[in-house]
Amino acid sequence: MAIGGLACAGAIAVPAASFIAAPAAGSAGAAGGRERWVRVGRLADLPPGEPRRLKVIGEERDAFTVAKDQMLGAIWVIREGEKIRAMSATCPHLGCGIELNDDKKSFNCPCHASRFGLSGAPETGPSPRAMDPLATRVVDGWLEVDFRRYRDGVAELQEIAG
C-alpha cells in the first residue's frame, strides 16, 4: 500500500514540478525571463521598410500537456537594412490587437484608439507605454523572435508567463 501511494504521489509531483521549473528554450510555458526563440518567417520575405504582421506559432505547455503548433500571438516586424525590429501586436493598454493604419506610417489599436508610430512609440490614446519590443535574430535565413508577453495596463514592462 505504501509503495502504491508513493507511486501515485510521484505521478502527480513530477508533472507539477516540470510546470514549476522553467521550460526548455523554444517552448511557450512560463518564461521566467528565459529566452524563447520562435521561428516566424523567412528573412527574404520581408521587404525593406514595410511593416509585416507575422503569426507566432509554437509549443504551448501546461503542467500535464504539450500542444504543438499553437497560435501564441502575433508580432509586427520591420526590416531596416540589416536590422530587423519586432514588436508585439498586442496593445499594452488592454490587450487588443494592434493594426497598421492605411497610410502605413503608424499603428492603431481599434479598441480604445491608442496610436503608435512605426517605432512603436505611443502618439495618442490611453496606452501606458510603447508597443512591446521583442529581440530578433536570423538563423539560416529564418527570422526568429524571442517571444514574450507583458502585463497590460502598466507603464513598466512586466513579463508574464505563457
Image: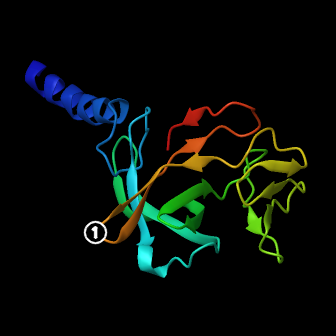
Residue 162 versus residue 155 in the image, above or below: below
The percent coordinates of residue 143 (x first, y second) are: 41, 65
Q: Residue at x 22, y 34 (%)?
A: 11
The percent coordinates of residue 82 (x first, y second) are: 47, 64
Q: Residue at x 75, y 32 (%)?
A: 155
Q: Residue at x 55, y 70 (%)?
A: 54
For the question of whether residue 68 can be seen, the reply is yes
For the question of whether residue 71 can be seen, the reply is no
User: In the rendered view of the protein, which quadrant contains the N terminus?
Assistant: top left
50 vs 5, left or right, is right
Residue 4 versus residue 55 in the image, above or below: above
The percent coordinates of residue 126 (x first, y second) are: 88, 44
Q: List the residue tagged with mark 1.
A: 140
Q: Residue furthest top?
A: 2
Query: Which amino acid type corresponds to the residue marked 1 in the rendered image?
Result: Asp
The percent coordinates of residue 20 (x first, y second) are: 36, 30
Residue 35: quadrant of the picture: top left
Residue 155 versus residue 90 in the image, above or below: above
Residue 76 versus residue 130 in the image, above or below: below
26 vs 73, left or right, is left
Q: Secondary structure at mark 1?
A: loop
Residue count near mark 1 (Cα–Cα under 10 Å), binned few <14, some 14–19, many ≥20: few
Q: Nearer the viewer, residue 76 or 70?
A: 76
Its colouring scheme is rainbow
